[in-house]
């Protein structure tokens, strides 16, 4: 049985998802110690037997900078102890946005991060990475990878929970994705025009929405980070006499006070997938991740 | 002139030392932007021309985990922009302690960290790395490297500032180093027997010190981290009727409240080299680092 040779490790904060994956797949959960010395260095120990096993490291990558080293160390330790292969499950993949040099001298961190991950992970499973200008994750990662799409789960959630929805996508690039979610949910959709003025500030222009006065607006986006776009859209919907919107994101990044700021803007609800641990998570994507892990097993 | 082709970049927090190095060497200081996006990702931009230049990245590595990615990004960006080579100046080098598997399953982070640094730095300059069980930095780093020794500067400082000193080293491994400092300072020395009980707790046994009642005890160690050893030694010196000690460390790591704890233990003074920015720094090692950079230049 191939599955007997697979072992899942939860990096700190990923215990809940890892537990779900272990149940779906009926595979072993590894025991490891990851702690900080008083001087801030990381200590890593693997207590389970990983020899000749396929090691799956579960580590979502929001706030990535201080997650990288513990993850790298755990991977190297597993290899030192005889692991057959290392697969990284990062439901949220960081550093997907700076994928070109917008201003002279800028670092293309998307490329550099991809290279660094390839140093310690032999394969990668992620959920809807932010492929803005890239067509495929293979343009950034040169290791075998599997992308899971949440669109169907989001459509189902909308169908089950919202009467008479109208979906609102943040910008023209989101059109293809939003239209698919809308179609599967049997709903109409609108796409906004967005102009980014800085890290936090955006301008949003709302088209004619009079036809949707009796609908529940559903703002959807892949990442909710500062929530700037959703807050600005909510303000404009209110002005246009629309109902308070339901906000749906795939990845609950929520930088700083973004979640509270979005609530304060007067939204009806905030819903996210469980790619990053957060109180707004109500769409469970663990089964799809487990399937991807299972498929990888058969490929081995 | 080779030196015209060298450019120094200060990673955040390393500005003061980099300024000194630039003055010693009379070379250009590079301008870069390193900042965090609201979601915690790092943005990097190099505004100076680095094309065909020897790039020196100055980044001391205490509290290393969230320094690694910005450093890696800056290096990759410089290379992307045509830098001839990348040299890392890390006056304090992290992850030197876990250099073997003490308990089954442990990660040998010293080895892994060395490998990771080698991914983005082509050479390395550091000050007195903690080579406890290793004889040479080459056992950990497979890139050209230069180790600067602070012993002479420390001896000079003691000679200039302390009347009738007796040097006290923390353990038998420090004997060679402490005896050298003592000899150059024209002082006697004692070496303690230390037993480590945990990250913070140590047992220290003080030999007969009656002969040194009129001396000023000078506790010296390479790293002052939790200061556990120095605090415990100070307590025992007090019991033995000795004067309050002067504490000298090379690297001012000072985990958590260690500096204040050490002061509270009743020491006369705390002195460190400027390998890590800290208020206790009074021994300036910048000239020696500059010399090492200059030597590297001639090697190129």
Image: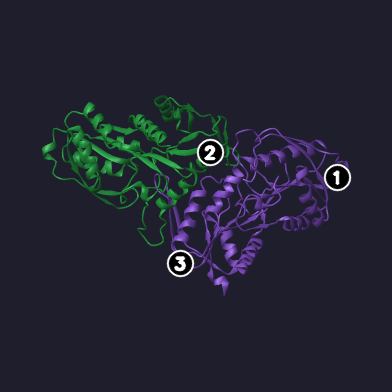
Chain colours: A purple, B green
Task: Pinpoint residue B74: horizontal percent, then vertical percent.
Answer: 53, 38
Residue B240 appearing in the image: yes
Q: Secondary structure at mark 3?
A: loop
Task: Provide the residue designation for mark 1.
Answer: A212
Task: Pinpoint residue B218: horizontal percent, then vertical percent.
Answer: 22, 35
Q: CA distance from mark 3 to mark 2?
A: 38 Å
Q: Secondary structure at mark 2?
A: helix
Comparing marks 3 and 2, which lies closer to the viewer?
Answer: 2
**Residues marked 3 and 2, same chain:** no
Task: Provide the residue designation for mark 3.
Answer: A49
Task: Provide the residue designation for mark 2.
Answer: B74
Which image quarter holds the N terminus of chain B?
Answer: top left
Which image quarter holds the C terminus of chain B?
Answer: top left
State left or right for residue A116 relative to residue B110. Answer: right
- Closer to the chain start, of discs 3 and 1, is 3
User: Chain ID for label 2?
Assistant: B
Task: Pinpoint residue B221: horizontal percent, then vertical percent.
Answer: 28, 41
Q: Secondary structure at mark 1?
A: helix
């Amino acid at each position: 049985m191939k599955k007997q040779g697979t072992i899942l490790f939860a990096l700190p904060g990923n215990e809940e998802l890892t537990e779900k994956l272990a149940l779906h797949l009926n595979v072993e959960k590894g025991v490891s110690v990851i702690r900080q010395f008083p001087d801030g260095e990381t200590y890593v120990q693997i207590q389970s037997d990983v020899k000749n096993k396929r090691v799956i490291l579960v580590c979502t990558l929001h706030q990535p900078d201080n997650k990288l080293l513990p993850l790298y160390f755990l991977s190297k330790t597993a290899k030192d102890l005889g692991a057959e292969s290392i697969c990284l499950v990062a439901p949220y993949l960081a550093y997907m946005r700076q994928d070109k040099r917008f201003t002279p001298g800028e670092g293309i961190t998307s490329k550099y991060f991809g290279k660094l991950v390839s140093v310690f992970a032999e394969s990668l499973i992620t959920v809807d990475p932010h492929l803005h200008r890239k067509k495929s994750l293979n343009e950034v990662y040169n290791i075998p990878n599997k992308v899971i799409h949440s669109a169907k789960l989001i459509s189902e959630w909308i169908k089950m929970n919202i009467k008479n929805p109208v979906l609102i996508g943040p910008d023209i690039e989101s059109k293809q994705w939003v239209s698919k979610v809308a179609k599967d949910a049997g709903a109409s959709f609108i796409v906004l025009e967005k102009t980014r003025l800085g890290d936090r500030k955006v301008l949003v222009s709302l088209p004619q929405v009079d036809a949707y006065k009796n609908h529940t607006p559903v703002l959807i986006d892949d990442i909710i980070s500062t929530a700037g776009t959703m807050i600005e859209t909510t303000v404009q919907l209110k002005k246009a006499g629309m109902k308070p919107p339901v906000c749906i994101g795939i990845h609950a990044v929520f930088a700083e006070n973004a979640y509270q700021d979005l609530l304060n803007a007067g939204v009806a609800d905030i819903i996210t997938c469980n790619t990053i641990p957060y109180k707004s998570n109500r769409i469970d994507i663990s089964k799809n991740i487990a399937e991807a892990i299972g498929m990888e097993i058969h490929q081995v």
